[in-house]
Amino acid sequence: MFTGREPSGYTATAKTSVQTASLSKARIADLLRKHPSLHNHISSLTSRHKDVMTARATTIVQSDFKGTFDTMPFGNVLQILNVGRKSGVLGILKDGHSGGIYLENGNPVHAWTDDSSGEPAFFLLSGWTTAKFAFNSMRREVQRSLEKPMMTLLMEAMRRQEETSGPKDVSLDQLFPST
């Protein structure tokens, strides 16, 4: 429980220079009273954050479709959802890390992980070969971060995985087995 005496456990990374300020709970309450639009904006942000976190937490427990990527690979799962023109969130968990992909009519429109969003998150998730996944039909509540079509993203994900796995040494006996 936050008492106002401990430092926050959250980390933020800024893209530009920023200034920070430490405000007491009383000072924040005073600021919100004086600026109702700020209060509305912060309420909206916390509500959206709560919805996204709820979606992440409930995805695995209560789902329309679930499994593991070691039994059904990432690409296959996305293609099934694409062909079925499904809309909802594909939540993914691996070793204490989480992420997901929102789909609209089977097309990915937003991807996120604990540390990234958009295409970097999509490509990271595509490499989680032993992760658990679950799909829930629901409305997207976050801003779009993916613009490319499903197949373009999947082909790029496969190219990247092959690139990182490196060349595979194959012996002549494997290429030309003796009969």
Image (tube, rainbow, N blue to C red):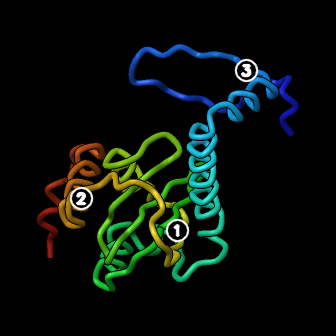
Q: Name the residue beneath numbered marker 2.
A: 153
Q: Is residue 174 visible?
A: no
Q: Position of residue 6 (x, y in %)?
A: 82, 24
Q: Secondary structure at mark 1?
A: strand
Q: Is residue 42 above or below residue 83?
A: above
Query: SS at mark 3?
Result: loop
Q: Position of residue 125 (x, y in %)?
A: 42, 54
| Mark sitting earlier along the chain (1/3) | 3
Residue 132, by quadrant, is bottom right
What is the crowding at mark 3: few (fewer than 14 residues within 10 Å), some, or many (at least 20)?
A: few
Q: How far apart are the alpha carbons under marks 3 and 2? A: 43 Å
Q: Amino acid at mark 2?
A: Leu
Q: Determine crowd level at label 1: few under 14, some 14-19, many 20+ residues with C-alpha closer than 10 A.
A: many
Residue sticking out furthest to the bottom = 84
Name the one closer to the observer, 144 or 111. 144
Q: If the image is split into quadrants, where does the C terminus sit?
A: bottom left
In this rendering, the answer to whether 57 lies above or below 65 is above
Can you tell which of label 1 and label 3 is closer to the viewer?
Answer: 3
Considering depth in this image, is 132 or 174 the residue closer to the camera? 132
- In the rendered structure, the answer to whether residue 27 lies left or right of residue 75 reads right
Instruction: Please name the residue that numbered disc 1 is placed on.
Output: 133
Under tag 2, what secondary structure? helix
Q: Residue at x 58, y 78 (%)?
A: 63
Res 23 label: 3
Estimate the spatial distance between the alpha carbons at disc 1 and disc 3, rounded to whole Å.
40 Å
| Residues marked 1 and 3 touching at CB (< 8 Å) | no
Write the residue at 23% across / 45% down: 163
Amino acid under disc 3: Leu
